[in-house]
Image: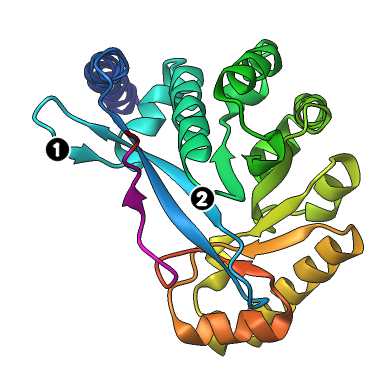
């Protein structure tokens, strides 16, 4: 028992040391503008190109090497830096929107931003400065965050919709009760969870699950986007099931947004 406690304390100390390094990296990257906006097109299965994009973020280390969110996001979450990263992404996304014929841009909001009381006023100011139509921006929250912080998410979603923005739920169907999320929130789009896409073409039970999620969304007039679509067979099944849009490496790899 005692050695396990020592191990755990040791691990906590190591985690703290690693986090401190990340915190320094993230703060200097924010100061030195070493974040990069990436866009990934969302394809329509309804035939017409809708000019829809998902945005992602990358961080560059001081040597200019690209770091993926998987490497730094957890440390950012543990150290109260997600709001800063979210705001950088939102600012860059609005600039992208203003400079391109983008019809719909999807921007993720972290749990910290969902719980941030000042975000709606800040977004209002950003919108005035960017001079874009708010309906071109859709803010998305994961189903897990929406479920865990339902009251905060409902307030935020209502405020976003009132300001003219769109609201979306990502990883839809990952939790036990996706119907509850749609019952309580004003949602424009759902992104059906990417884990359901793995082996979708050969697993009837997954197809049934996805069909139920699509029917649930359609009953609420909510648009459907499938996440992490990686091959033609999956796309064909999704088309048969009635999904409207798809995103993932089968459509396109993320590309850096050059804003200049």
Q: Is residue 234 magenta?
A: no
Residue 79, image quadrant: top left
Please tell me how crowded label 2 is: few (under 14), some (14-19), or many (20+) other residues with Cα within 10 Å.
some
Q: How crowded is mark 1: few (under 14 residues within 10 Å), some or many (20 or more)?
A: few
Q: Is residue 255 magenta?
A: yes
Residue 161 appears in the figure? yes
Is 154 drawn above or below residue 124 in the view shown?
Answer: below
In this rendering, the answer to whether 228 lies above or below 158 is below
Please determine whether, in this image, residue 92 is positioned above or below residue 10.
below
Kindly indicate the quadrant of the structure image that contains residue 154.
top right
**Which residue was labeled with disc 1?**
65
Cβ atoms under marks 2 and 1 closer than 8 Å = no
The disc placed on residue 54 is 2
Element under disc 1: loop
In the rendered structure, find residue 115 and report the number of the disc placed on it: none
Q: Residue 126 in the image: state x and y as whole percent.
A: 58, 18
The residue sitting at 32% across, 25% down in the picture is 8
Kindly tell me whether residue 177 is visible in this rendering: no
- Residue 194 lies, in percent from the top left, at 54, 62
Magenta span of residues: 251-258
Please state the horizontal and vertical placement of residue 88, each as a whole percent of the image. Answer: 44, 23
Q: In which quarter of the image is the C terminus?
A: top left
Identity of the residue drawn at 55% across and 89% down: 202
148 to the left or right of 22? right
249 vs 97, left or right, is left
* Secondary structure found at label 2: strand
Quarter of the figure that contains the N terminus: top left
Mark in front: 2 vs 1: 2
Closer-to-camera residue (78/94): 94
Q: How many marks?
A: 2
Q: Is residue 217 left or right of residue 200?
A: right
């Amino acid at each position: 028992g005692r050695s396990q406690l020592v191990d755990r304390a040791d691990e906590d100390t190591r985690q703290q040391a690693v986090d401190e390094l990340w915190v320094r990296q993230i703060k200097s990257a924010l100061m030195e503008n070493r974040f990069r906006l990436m866009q990934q097109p969302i394809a329509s299965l309804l035939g017409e190109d809708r000019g829809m994009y998902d945005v992602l973020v990358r961080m560059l280390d001081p040597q200019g090497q690209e770091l993926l969110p998987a490497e730094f996001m957890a440390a950012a979450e543990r150290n109260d830096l997600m709001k800063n990263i979210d705001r950088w992404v939102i600012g860059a996304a609005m600039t992208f929107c203003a400079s391109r014929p983008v019809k719909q841009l999807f921007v993720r909001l972290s749990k910290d931003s969902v719980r941030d009381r000042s975000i709606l006023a800040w977004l209002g100011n950003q919108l005035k400065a960017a001079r874009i139509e708010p309906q071109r921006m859709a803010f998305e929250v994961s189903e897990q965050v929406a479920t865990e912080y339902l009251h905060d998410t409902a307030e935020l979603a209502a405020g976003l919709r009132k300001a003219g923005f769109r609201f979306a739920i990502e990883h839809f169907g990952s939790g036990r009760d996706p119907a509850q999320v749609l019952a309580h929130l004003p949602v424009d789009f759902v992104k059906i969870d990417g884990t359901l896409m793995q082996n979708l073409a050969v697993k009837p039970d997954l197809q049934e699950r996805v069909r139920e999620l699509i029917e649930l969304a359609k009953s609420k007039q909510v648009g459907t986007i499938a996440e992490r679509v990686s091959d033609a067979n999956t796309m064909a099944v999704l088309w048969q099931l009635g999904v409207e849009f798809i995103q993932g490496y089968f459509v396109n790899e993320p590309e850096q947004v050059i804003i200049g």
